[in-house]
Amino acid sequence: MAIFTSGGDCAGMNPAIKHFVDYCFDRGIQPYLIYDGLEGLIDGNIRKANHNDVAGILHEGGTILRSSRSKRFFDYEYRKQAYKNLVSNDINKLIVLGGDGSFRALQQFYHDFGVEFVGIPATIDNDIFGTDYCLGVDTALNMIRNATDAIRDTSSSFKRACVVETMGRECGYLALISALTCGAEICIIPELEYNLNSLGIKLKEEIINGRNYIVCVVAEGTNQTQRLVEWLECDIGIETRATILGHVQRGGSPTVYDRLMAVEFVSFAIDTLSQKDIKDGLVIIYKDGKFDFVTIDYINSSTYSIKQNLLDMAINMVK
């Protein structure tokens, strides 16, 4: 049985890798590590794991296995080479930490060669349909919180507005939760329509009554960061700075919650691979406080939606 990481990295991957090795040995299974994602699978960058390989990595962000986005894996001949590499190492089961793109790639790999696999959702975007939580999200939210709190400090010192842009692609989860937990006045996400006119009236009144700073959190998928800066300066009349947090959100030492979720995701994945005949590949999900597995087709059958009760909490930040 082997594990690898694919696509965008996130905190929590290293705790997952460590627990994979430890839990495999506890179950009498020889663990293998695949380095450099799908590219490493093609190039045969595979080796037997031992406890020393994962010692001292629990607190580290990123992934010691490294990652990649592979165009070559779309070519059958390269997938065939990847399969030969697995056969030569006597590997017939895989665990992948990644997103829906990685899962689809391995689904095709299963159709080609019958290699059983289980996917663990690991993306800070938290945008995979079927699961309430993806590995790495809690650490990313804490990184955003730390940055936003610090930016608020300096904004209040100079009577400024700050526009903080978060990652998330077309999903506003990171921005929404960050806005709610950082006390933002404005939250702009793809899932909610916003009204700058009504927001402007409210903010101008608050400024008259003594407000000396404004915090705005915006999801990158809206492409509204620069527009908000211009609106705040020209219409509201407050000096404004924009901060695009970027890849800092993927780093940082994994939080306790992400470390615990890594352990539970991996344990469930190994048990599933050990006890079941996997047909077409499975993805482990965390739904309503419980772990379960679903098919890749189910994951791809719809798009992730933020829970309505969370969206309702943000109404006063968009209108």
Image: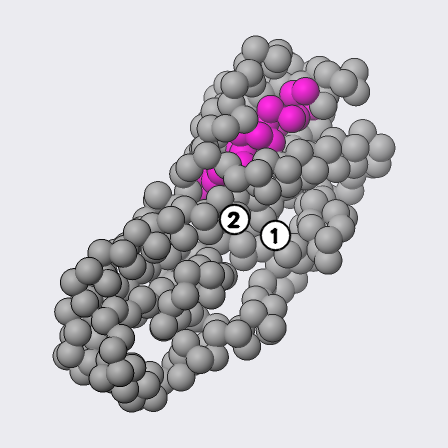
Say which mark, if any, is on residue 55. Answer: none
The quadrant of the picture occupied by the C terminus is: bottom left
- Residue tagged 1: 133
Q: Nearer the viewer, residue 253 or 135?
A: 253
Q: Quadrant of residue 153?
A: bottom left
Secondary element at image label 2? helix
Q: Nearer the viewer, residue 39 or 141?
A: 141
| Left or right of 60 on screen, residue 256 | right
**Mark 2 Cα shell of 10 Å, populated few (<14), some (14-19), many (≥20):** many
Image point (26%, 75%), residue name: 211
| x and y percentages locating residue 286 in the rendered image | 69, 50
Q: Which residues are magenta?
A: 1-22
Q: Amino acid at mark 1?
A: Tyr
Q: Quadrant of residue 96?
A: top right
| x and y percentages locating residue 200 in the rendered image | 28, 84
- Residue tagged 2: 137
What separation in Å lies between label 1 and label 2 (alpha carbons)?
Answer: 7 Å
Image point (45%, 48%), residue name: 142
Q: Amino acid at mark 2?
A: Val
